[in-house]
Amino acid sequence: MPKSTLDLKWANRELRVRTFDAFPQDWAKIQNNLGTTYTMRILGKQADNLEQAIAYYQESLRVYTSDSFRYEWARTLYNLGNAYNDKKFQKR
């Protein structure tokens, strides 16, 4: 999972190589890891980071379906729910 700005740059470069069409499982894993990274990110505005995390999690669900990748699908939904929950409480 990326932990720094440098790692985020690396992950985004990887997405240019590990595309949805060529490597869907790798692509989904990177999307999910970016989602987790943005939920924990302390740089920038928390609301923006959570929005980005939600977008990455939703993208990974294009590959992680309940039929094909049951564990990854459930884990991603759990992470997505936590991101929405954090976003809800962040506004208060």
Image (tube, helix red, strand yellow):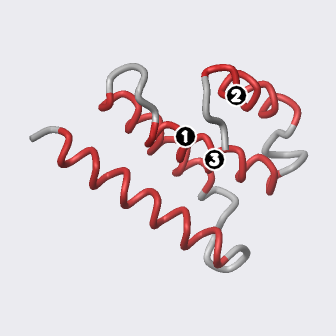
Separation of disc 1 and disc 2 at Cα? 10 Å
Is 22 situated left or right of 71 in this image? right
How busy is the neighbourhood of tag 1: few (under 14 within 10 Å), some, or many (20 plus)?
many
* Label annotation for residue 68: none
> At x 72% / y 27%, what residue is drawn?
12
The residue under label 1 is 37
The answer to whether residue 1 is above or below residue 81 is above
Kindly indicate whether the residue at mark 2 contacts the one at mark 3 (C-beta within 8 angstroms): no
> At x 55% / y 68%, what residue is drawn?
75
Q: Position of residue 24 (x, y in %)?
A: 81, 53
Is 50 situated left or right of 25 in this image? left
What's the residue type where badge 1 is placed? Thr
Q: Looking at the image, which residue sits at the far left?
A: 92
User: Element at badge 3?
Assistant: helix
Place residue 13 in its image quadrant: top right
* Label annotation for residue 7: 2
The residue under label 3 is 33
Is 69 situated left or right of 26 in this image? left
Q: Position of residue 80 (x, y in %)?
A: 44, 57
Kindly indicate whether the residue at mark 1 contacts the one at mark 3 (C-beta within 8 angstroms): yes
User: Element at badge 1?
Assistant: helix
Q: Position of residue 16 (x, y in %)?
A: 82, 28
> At x 80% / y 57%, what residue is drawn?
25
Separation of disc 3 and disc 1 at Cα? 6 Å
Choose the circle earlier in sequence order: 3 or 2.
2
User: Element at badge 2?
Assistant: helix
What's the residue type where badge 2 is placed? Asp
Separation of disc 3 and disc 2 at Cα? 11 Å
Kindly indicate whether the residue at mark 2 contacts the one at mark 1 (C-beta within 8 angstroms): yes
Dividing the image into 4 quarters, which one contains the C terminus?
A: top left
Place residue 76 in its image quadrant: bottom right
The answer to whether residue 74 is above or below residue 53 is below
